[in-house]
Image (cartoon, rainbow, N blue to C red):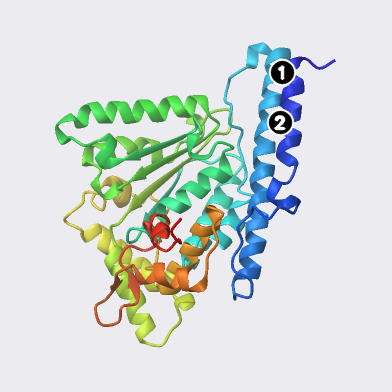
Amino acid sequence: MLGGTERLLWLLLLSLLLPPPSAWGHGGQARPREGTEEAGSAGAWLAFKGLRERLRAAGALSRRYWALFSCRVWPEGCGKDEEASARPRGLEADLRVRLHGQHLARELVLTAVRAYLEMPRPDKALALSFHGWSGTGKNFVARMLAENLYQDGLRSDCVKVFISTLHFPHPKNVDLYEEELTDKIRKTQEHCRQTLFILDEAEKLHPGLLEALRPHLERQAPSNRRAESKRTIFLFLSNLGGNIINEVVLNLLKAGQSREEVRMEHLESRLQAEIVASTDSGFGHSRLVKENLIDLFIPFLPLEFRHVRLCARDAFLSQDLLYTEEALDEIARMMVYVPKEEQLFSSQGCKSISQRISYVLPEG
């Protein structure tokens, strides 16, 4: 016989799998305007999104139910390493559908993460460095990676986010910050078989903090590897190199190439040279870069008007709001585009798009 807690959990599980009330014919769910070019694909994505969210919630609940059951049967193992090693099964779809204008980042991130997670016993952490202007998707991809590797996404105990200006604001306290950072990394790795560390505004990290990270990114000798296979991913997010990325893309577009023809061969050497030559940041002068401990420098390209429209569409869908083509155009026109003559790239990417929706919604 099931106890009261078990019955309640099963009822919640069943309710999550049921379609929402708007799918029962009462018309409560918002959809794009019929007859528009994007209505079919956007409507399909909205339906898929709703189903995926219900299945993800149901899966999380079933895992919690199993955790509750296993804790009662095997209490000695309860609470240890709650996050199992995952595979990015949904990452490819998320990057393809939700990330706009970033074919290089999509390919590089997916290939690197998939290869790393398939290693039977990796001998070093995977370190990826995301570069590009604000609003181009660096934080967005970091969040997608967390959501696909951990059931609680960024809220997982196995994911830690550090923002330079927030967590390490005072250079005079760098010794304390180094101790706190390394202690947090060590404790998280002890608790979890798979860990994710996100360092935002990496170009503003104090050289001492960059040096403190070095042992965690170095290759480990076979004798020093743990018996149990553990994995760590470091993501460095930075605006550093954004200008050179934009310059290369602009010149290629002026030369008649399409955006989708931009390849890493066009960007890799110039991006790394820009990072190393920067005098405003110690990141490029750190041993992390000089000793090739960063596995990939991933460029995020500047976003164009059409990409901003897609971001606006996604923002409407995420809030279950109606939208029109005119509304998407109006929101996209709110952004500032550069260079001054060509006006090709949004200076803020898709940043603050969600907040701009309120300006085009009908009053009342």
Q: Is residue 24 visible?
A: yes
The answer to whether 298 is drawn above or below residue 193 in the figure is below
Disc sitting over residue 232 in the figure? none
From where the camera sits, is residue 20 visible? no
Secondary structure of the residue carrying tag 1 is: helix
Kind of residue indicated by mark 2: Leu
Q: Position of residue 113 (x, y in %)?
A: 54, 50
Residue 99: image location, x then y, percent = 50, 61
The image position of residue 335, as x and y in percent, is 33, 67
- Residue, x 63% and y 53% (percent of image)? 49
Residue plotted at (51% across, 31% down): 225
Label 1 or label 2, whichever comes before in sequence order: 1
Mark 1 touching mark 2, by CB under 8 A? no
Q: Which mark is residue 5?
A: 1
Of 259 and 111, nearer the camera is: 259
Read off the residue under disc 2. Answer: 12
| Residue 329 sits above or below residue 165 on the image | below
Q: Where is residue 147, by image quadrant?
A: top right
Q: Position of residue 194 (x, y in %)?
A: 54, 35
Direction front: furthest residue: 364
Crowding around mark 2 (Cα neighbors within 10 Å: few <14, some 14 to 19, many 20+) is some
The amino acid type of the residue labelled 1 equals Thr
Query: In this rendering, would 23 be left or right of 134?
Result: right
Q: Looking at the image, which residue sits at the far left? A: 172
Other residues around mark 1 within 10 Å, as few (<14) / some (14–19) / many (≥20): few
Horizontal relation, residue 335 to residue 278: left or right: right
Q: Nearer the viewer, residue 325 or 146?
A: 325
The span from disc 1 to disc 2 (Cα, nearest Å) is 11 Å
Q: Residue furthest right?
A: 1
Assign the N terminus to one quadrant of the image: top right
Looking at the rendered structure, the number of numbered marks drawn on it comes to 2
